[in-house]
Image (cartoon, helix red, strand yellow):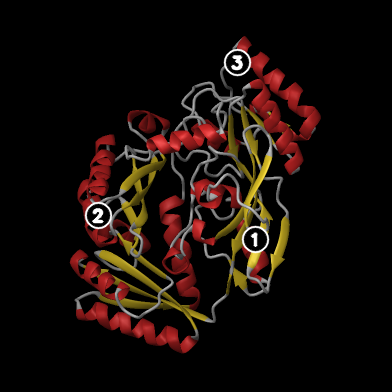
């Protein structure tokens, strides 16, 4: 284990106090200090704060009751907390400052109920996405999300970061699939909303409120999702060429009667990285009964070729490998200089936005925009681009009624920029909601807007 700076007396006393208070609740095995953390956890935890000597205690409650008691102690002692699941997205969002405790829900990992006939599943927040998907597949069902780091991502973390994927074209995002939640408040009390309960709480639509809240309103303990049947067949059409032709094909497709499950516009750099052609790309996925898939694939191929695009059809294992490779280009491998951003623009501006990315990065930046929603992700390299590049991309997105949020980036980059870049008229309302749910500002301080 690498050496690290000595704690100040204040830090040592604080850590002893936290440990001595929480051990009777979660047991010795439920407390982990910095020195005993696995290296991958150390790396993720270090990204969650701007402090050089950021060495918090990690607590692993085994039950919701234990989590409730831990948060009650945090409320009583004024300890600031970053909630997480498996820790894969601890580096997302703003960097915190002085934090006493990180609380992981990864031991809250039970599947509570899978109502196969009702197409719903209820699970604890620490269940890993890949484990749930494997269980659902055994009954011919699936949860149509494609989160970053699917092997490590937990359901609570996916909801907290609103992390969806290409299937949002057909099935919507996280908030469209979420039916109910349970969570522990900042004072340790347990609350529920939505599915599996009779009444909502305090007039808020808590499922939508907690989706994308980055653990700033409460710690999710249980989620209920709508699931869907696995589809009989699938194929993907890849069209590459000039940006104007890609934009025209996308517009025609979205206005047609065709029913794709995914429509992604890819930057020149991403097309090159995937080795699927030259120029900008359009990936269109159809999943349905076999004859419908064949007919729709041939129709969009014809439209693209009429507009001068080069078309290819991917099926079976080749198609599966393509869709597995696409998100990995954005998220993996996570280098020390990588910058990943979430963006949103008007869908009609998607192709122009990726042209702008190519111009600012000499086509080294990787960009992906979901054509139907205008949401997407960028991957840049801080060794190649400057903070000013991010500012110019953000200005472009905002000029097209959108946004740019920095997810992952070296701490030095985040300290030079406003991670969220949000200055809209919703700030006062967000402050009021935060005050209602977390009046002492204990949860994820400085991490959210």
The first of marks 3 and 1 along the sequence is: 3
| Residue 385: percent from left, percent from top | 28, 40
282 and 18: which one is in front?
Answer: 18
Q: Residue at x 42, y 31 (%)?
A: 411
Helix, strand or loop at mark 2:
helix
Q: Residue at x 18, y 66 (%)?
A: 244
Residue under label 1? 132
285 w.r.t. 410: above or below: below
Q: CA distance from mark 1 to mark 2?
A: 35 Å
182 and 204: which one is in front?
Answer: 204
Q: Nearer the viewer, mark 3 or mark 2?
A: 2
36 and 367: which one is in front?
Answer: 367
309 w.r.t. 158: above or below: below
Quarter of the view holding residue 421:
top left
| Residue 370: percent from left, percent from top | 36, 61
Q: Quadrant of the C terminus?
A: top left
The first of marks 3 and 2 along the sequence is: 3
Q: Residue at x 24, y 58 (%)?
A: 349
**Crowding near the residue tagged with mark 3, few <14, some 14–19, many ≥20 C-alpha atoms within 10 Å:** few
Residue under label 3? 7
Q: Are marks 3 and 2 in contact (CB under 8 Å)?
A: no
**Crowding near the residue tagged with mark 1, few <14, some 14–19, many ≥20 C-alpha atoms within 10 Å:** some
The first of marks 1 and 2 along the sequence is: 1
Residue under label 2? 353
The reply to whether residue 154 is visible in this rendering is no
The reply to whether residue 416 is visible in this rendering is yes
**Crowding near the residue tagged with mark 2, few <14, some 14–19, many ≥20 C-alpha atoms within 10 Å:** many
* Residue farthest top in this picture: 9
Q: CA distance from mark 3 to mark 1?
A: 40 Å
């Amino acid at each position: 284990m690498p050496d690290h700076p000595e704690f100040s007396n204040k830090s040592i006393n604080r850590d002893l106090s936290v440990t001595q208070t929480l051990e009777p609740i979660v047991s010795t095995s439920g407390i982990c200090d910095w020195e005993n953390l696995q290296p991958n956890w150390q790396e993720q935890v270090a990204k969650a704060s701007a402090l050089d000597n950021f060495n918090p205690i990690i607590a692993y409650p085994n039950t919701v009751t234990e989590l409730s008691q831990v948060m009650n102690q945090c409320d009583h002692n004024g300890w600031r907390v970053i909630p997480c699941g498996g820790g894969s997205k601890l580096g997302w969002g703003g960097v915190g400052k002085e934090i006493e405790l990180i609380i992981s829900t990864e031991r809250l990992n039970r599947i509570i109920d899978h109502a196969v006939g009702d197409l719903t599943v209820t699970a604890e927040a620490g269940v890993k996405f890949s484990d749930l998907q494997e269980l659902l597949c055994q009954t011919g069902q699936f949860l149509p999300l494609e989160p970053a780091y699917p092997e490590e991502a937990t359901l609570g973390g996916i909801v907290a970061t609103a992390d969806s994927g290409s299937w949002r074209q057909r099935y919507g995002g996280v908030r469209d699939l979420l039916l109910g939640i349970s969570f522990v408040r900042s004072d340790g009390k347990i609350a529920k909303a939505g599915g599996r309960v009779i009444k909502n709480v305090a007039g808020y639509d808590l499922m939508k409120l907690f989706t994308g809240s980055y653990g700033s309103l409460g710690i999710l303990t249980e989620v209920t999702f709508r699931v869907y049947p696995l589809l009989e067949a699938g194929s993907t059409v890849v069209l590459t060429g000039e940006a104007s032709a890609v934009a025209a094909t996308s517009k025609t497709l979205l206005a047609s009667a065709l029913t794709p499950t995914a429509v992604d516009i890819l930057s020149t750099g991403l097309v090159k990285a995937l080795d699927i052609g030259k120029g900008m790309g359009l990936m269109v996925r159809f999943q349905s009964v076999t004859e419908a898939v064949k007919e729709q694939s041939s129709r969009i191929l014809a439209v693209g070729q009429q507009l001068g695009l080069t078309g290819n059809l991917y099926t079976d294992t080749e198609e599966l490998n393509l869709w597995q490779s696409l998100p990995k280009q954005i998220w993996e491998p996570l280098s020390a200089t990588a910058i990943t951003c979430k963006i949103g623009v008007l869908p009609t501006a998607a192709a122009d936005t990726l042209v702008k990315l190519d111009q600012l990065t000499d086509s080294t930046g990787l960009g992906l925009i979901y054509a139907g929603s205008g949401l997407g992700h960028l991957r840049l390299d801080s060794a190649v681009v400057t903070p000013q590049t991010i500012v110019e991309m953000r200005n472009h997105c905002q000029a097209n009624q959108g946004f740019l949020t920095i997810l992952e980036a070296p701490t030095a980059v985040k300290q030079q920029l406003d991670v969220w870049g949000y200055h809209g008229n919703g700030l006062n309302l967000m402050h009021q909601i935060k005050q209602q749910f977390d009046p002492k500002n204990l949860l994820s301080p400085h991490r959210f807007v």
